[in-house]
C-alpha cells in the first residue's frame, strides 16, 4: 500500500534484449463492478484523518503529520480555505503559514496520501466557511449558486489554485488521490444544479479527466438530492452514534454501485463560546470503530497487504463493505488534529441564535490542540493494529511545554486615544452607519462615532434594531465605557449626557457564520442606533487596522501614552517577558480579564473570553517566541482589565470553565 512510498508499480529498466511491458500507469479509480477503489489497478482501502494546515503553525506541520502517520493513517484529508489565500480580489498569499504547496509536498515526503477539499466553500467552522468576505461587497450576491458574480470570483480563484494542485495528483506522480467538489451542498438552501455542473466543468478543465472527484453530504434524502450530481461520486458523513446500515443505505440510494464512503467520522466536536466544553469518550469512539471493523473481519483485513496482491484480485463481497467503510474503505476522521483558530479565523453557527466558535479548535481530537497524542489516539491506534500492521517505530512524544509564570502588563492607551495610529487614513463620513463590507473591512474592529443631538439629563434608551449589532458593540460616551450591545443579546443601554457629547461604538466582528443559509453574514452596525426611538445620524466611521500597526512594532516602539489607570472599556496593555533559554509551547490564561485579543511578537493568537468560557487559555506555539530577546505582549481588552493586570503562562490548557446558570463551575 502507498504508505511507505508512492512509487509502487515503477520498475527499474530491463537489461533483457526483448521489449518489456511498460510499468502500469499510476491510477486511482472507482470500480463499480466490484464496489471498491482501485489504486494502480489493485483493490485498495485507506485510513484517513483530517488536519487543517491553516490552524497549525508551519513549524509544527511535520510533527503533526508524522504523528498521524505513526498512528496508522495512510492518508490525510485537507481543506483549502479560499479566504486564507485571497484576502482581496486578485491579491494572493501563499507564503509562510499559507504555503499550501509546501504542506502538500511534506505529506508526500512522509508517505501520506491526500484527499483534498478545495471548496470553494469548505464550512470547517472557519470564518464564512472559507468564502472571502469581499464577495459581500456586492450586497445582493447569491453565494454558492450560479449567480454570475459569484461564479466569476470562483473561476478566478480556481484558475490560480488548481494549477498548483494538478502536478501533485496521483496520476501525475503526486499523492493526491481524490478531490472533493464543494462541501455538504445538499445542506444549503439554493439546491442549484447549474452551480454544481459549472464546478464540475471547471475542475475537469483544470485538472483533467482522470482525477476522482466526489461530493460529501449528510444522509437525509433531501441533502443527497440537492448535493449530488452525475459525474461526481457521492459520499456521506455520519458519526459514531449512527446506524451504519441505514447511513450507507442512504449512499446506496444515490450510488447503487461503488465503494461505500463515510467522509467524516466524528472523533469529537467543537466548542462555542458560552457553552460546555464538548468531549467524546475514547472508549466510545474506539468501540464504534472496532464494531464496524469486526463485522467484516472474516474478509481479508490486511488492508496494507492488498497493495501487493494480484491486480485481478476481487474486492470483498458488497455485504462486507457496509461495515468496513466505517474505517477502512474510507474513514476520514474529522478531526484527527484540530489546531487553533488564530487571529480572526474562527467561524460561527446559527442555531436559533448566533453561536461563535472558540479560538481553540482542539475538537477533543486524537491529537490535541498542541499536537499531543491523547488517550483517544492510542485507543484508535490499538484498534487499527488489530486489523493491519502499524508503522515501525515509536509514536513521537508530546511537544515540551513550559509554564513561564506571571507576566506583569501595564496600560498603554485607551483605544479611542489611538485612532490616529489605528486608522491613519481618517474616518469615513456617512449620514447613517455603514457595514464592514461597505467600507471593505473584512475582520476585526470598526469605531462608529456620532454626537448626542440634545441634552439627556435623565436616562434615555440607546437602542439598536433586532439583529443589527453584528456582533458586539462596546459603547463609550465622552470616552467613558457605558456597556456592551450584543447580537441576539442586550440591544439597549441607558445613557445621559449633553448635546454634542461624543458617542462611540466599537464594533467587533466575532466571525462570520460558516454553515447554513445565513453565510451572507454582514458585520458592523446593520441598522441605525436610536436615542429614545429617535434615529442618530452624522456618523464618522473608523475602520481599524490594528494588526497592521502591531506588526509594524506599535505600541512597543512608540512612546508610552499617559492614560488613566483602571478605566473600563477598550484599551491596550503591553508587557514583555524573556524565556529562560528555551522557546517551548505554552498556554496563557487571563485572571480577572474580561474579553479581548492577544498578540505576542506581532502574531495574533486569537480571542480570549474567560468570563464567557468554556475556553480559559490561549495556545501559544513555541515558534512564536524568541529566545534571548524580550517577547512583546500586546493585549486589547474590550470591557475591563483587572486592577493589577497580569497574564499567567501555564504548561497545560484549561478548556472547561463554563457559566452554568448562576454559578461558575469548573469541570
Image: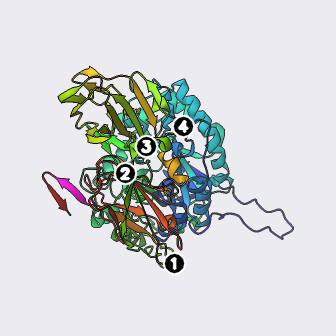
Whichever of labels 4 and 1 marks the residue nearer the N terminus, that label is: 4
- Per the rendered image, the range of residues in magenta is 656-660
**Mark 4: which secondary structure?**
loop
Quadrant the N terminus occupies: bottom right
Mainly helix, strand or loop, the magenta region?
Answer: strand
Q: Secondary structure at mark 2?
A: loop
Element carrying mark 1: loop
From mark 4 to mark 2, how far is it between C-alphas?
A: 64 Å
Residue 400 in view here: yes
Precedes in sequence: disc 3 or disc 2: 3
Using the image, determine if residue 99 lies above or below residue 477: below
**Residue lying farthest right?**
17
Label 4 and label 1: CA atoms lie apart by 40 Å
Total labels drawn = 4
Front disc: 3 or 1? 3
Provide the residue designation for mark 1.
392
Return the residue at label 3: 444
Q: Which residue is mark 4?
A: 231
In this rendering, the answer to whether 367 lies above or below 270 is below
Task: Identify the residue under disc 2.
Answer: 563
Mark 3 or mark 2, which is nearer to you?
Answer: 2
Coordinates of residue 491 in the picture (x, y in percent): 24, 33
Q: Tell me the number on the disc at residue 150.
A: none
Q: Residue at 39% of width from left, 41% of height from top?
A: 509
Amino acid at each position: 500500500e502507498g504508505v511507505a512510498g508512492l512509487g509502487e508499480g515503477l520498475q527499474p529498466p530491463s537489461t533483457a534484449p526483448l521489449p518489456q511491458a511498460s510499468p502500469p500507469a499510476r491510477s486511482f479509480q472507482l470500480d463499480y463492478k466490484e464496489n471498491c477503489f482501485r489504486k494502480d489497478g489493485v483493490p485498495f482501502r485507506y485510513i484517513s484523518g483530517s488536519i487543517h494546515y491553516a490552524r497549525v503553525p508551519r513549524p509544527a506541520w511535520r510533527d503533526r503529520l508524522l504523528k498521524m502517520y505513526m498512528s496508522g493513517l495512510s492518508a490525510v484529508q485537507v481543506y483549502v480555505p479560499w479566504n486564507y489565500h485571497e484576502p482581496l480580489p486578485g491579491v494572493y498569499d501563499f507564503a509562510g503559514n499559507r504555503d499550501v504547496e509546501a504542506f502538500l509536498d511534506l505529506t508526500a515526503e512522509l508517505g501520506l496520501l491526500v484527499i483534498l477539499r478545495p471548496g470553494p466553500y469548505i464550512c470547517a467552522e472557519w470564518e464564512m466557511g472559507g468564502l472571502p468576505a469581499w464577495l459581500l461587497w456586492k450586497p445582493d450576491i447569491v453565494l454558492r449558486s450560479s449567480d454570475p458574480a459569484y461564479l466569476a470570483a470562483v473561476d478566478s480563484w480556481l484558475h490560480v489554485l488548481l494549477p498548483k494542485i494538478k502536478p501533485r495528483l496521483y496520476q501525475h506522480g503526486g499523492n493526491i488521490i481524490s478531490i472533493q467538489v464543494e462541501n455538504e451542498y445538499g445542506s444549503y438552501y439554493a439546491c442549484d444544479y447549474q452551480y454544481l455542473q459549472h464546478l464540475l466543468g471547471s475542475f475537469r478543465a483544470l485538472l483533467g479527466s482522470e482525477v476522482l472527484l466526489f461530493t460529501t453530504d449528510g444522509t437525509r434524502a433531501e441533502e443527497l438530492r440537492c448535493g449530488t450530481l452525475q459525474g461526481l461520486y457521492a459520499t456521506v458523513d455520519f458519526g459514531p452514534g449512527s446506524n451504519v446500515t441505514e447511513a450507507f443505505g442512504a449512499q446506496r440510494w444515490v450510488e447503487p454501485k461503488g465503494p461505500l464512503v463515510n467522509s467524516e467520522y466524528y472523533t469529537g466536536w467543537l466548542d462555542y463560546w458560552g457553552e460546555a466544553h464538548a468531549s467524546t469518550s475514547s472508549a466510545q469512539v474506539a468501540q464504534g470503530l472496532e464494531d464496524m471493523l469486526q463485522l467484516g473481519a472474516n474478509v481479508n483485513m490486511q488492508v496494507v497487504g492488498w497493495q501487493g496482491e494480484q491486480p485481478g484480485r476481487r474486492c470483498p463481497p458488497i455485504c462486507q463493505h457496509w461495515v468496513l467503510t466505517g474505517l477502512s474503505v474510507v474513514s476520514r476522521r474529522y478531526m484527527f488534529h484540530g489546531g487553533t483558530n488564530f487571529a480572526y479565523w474562527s467561524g460561527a453557527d446559527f442555531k436559533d441564535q448566533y453561536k461563535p466558535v472558540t479560538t481553540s479548535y482542539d475538537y477533543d481530537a486524537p491529537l490535541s490542540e498542541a499536537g499531543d497524542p491523547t488517550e483517544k489516539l492510542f485507543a484508535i491506534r490499538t484498534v487499527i493494529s488489530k486489523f493491519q500492521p502499524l508503522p515501525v517505530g515509536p509514536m513521537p512524544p508530546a511537544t515540551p511545554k513550559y509554564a513561564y509564570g506571571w507576566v506583569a502588563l501595564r496600560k498603554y492607551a485607551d483605544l479611542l486615544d489611538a485612532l490616529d495610529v489605528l486608522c491613519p487614513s481618517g474616518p469615513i463620513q456617512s449620514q447613517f452607519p455603514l457595514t464592514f463590507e461597505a467600507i471593505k473591512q473584512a475582520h476585526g474592529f470598526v469605531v462608529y462615532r456620532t454626537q448626542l443631538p440634545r441634552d439627556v439629563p435623565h436616562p434615555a434608551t440607546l437602542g439598536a434594531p433586532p439583529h443589527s449589532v453584528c456582533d458586539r458593540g462596546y459603547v463609550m460616551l465622552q470616552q467613558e465605557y457605558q456597556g456592551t450591545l450584543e447580537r441576539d443579546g442586550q440591544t439597549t443601554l441607558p445613557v445621559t449626557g449633553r448635546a454634542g457629547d461624543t458617542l462611540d461604538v466599537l464594533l467587533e466582528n466575532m466571525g462570520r457564520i460558516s454553515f447554513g443559509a445565513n453565510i451572507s453574514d454582514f458585520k458592523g452596525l446593520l441598522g441605525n442606533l436610536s436615542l429614545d426611538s429617535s434615529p442618530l445620524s452624522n456618523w464618522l466611521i473608523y475602520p481599524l487596522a490594528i494588526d497592521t500597526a502591531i506588526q509594524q512594532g506599535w505600541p512597543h516602539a512608540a512612546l508610552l501614552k499617559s492614560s488613566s489607570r483602571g478605566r473600563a472599556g477598550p484599551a491596550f496593555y503591553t508587557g514583555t517577558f524573556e524565556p529562560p533559554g528555551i522557546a517551548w509551547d505554552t498556554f496563557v490564561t487571563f485572571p480577572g480579564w474580561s474579553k479581548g485579543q492577544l498578540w505576542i511578537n506581532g502574531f495574533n493568537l486569537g480571542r480570549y473570553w474567560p468570563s464567557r468560557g468554556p475556553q480559559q487559555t490561549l495556545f501559544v506555539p513555541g515558534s512564536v517566541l524568541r529566545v534571548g530577546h524580550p517577547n512583546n505582549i500586546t493585549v486589547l481588552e474590550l470591557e475591563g482589565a483587572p486592577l493589577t493586570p497580569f497574564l499567567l503562562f501555564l504548561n497545560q490548557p484549561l478548556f472547561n470553565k463554563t457559566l452554568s446558570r448562576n454559578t461558575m463551575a469548573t469541570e
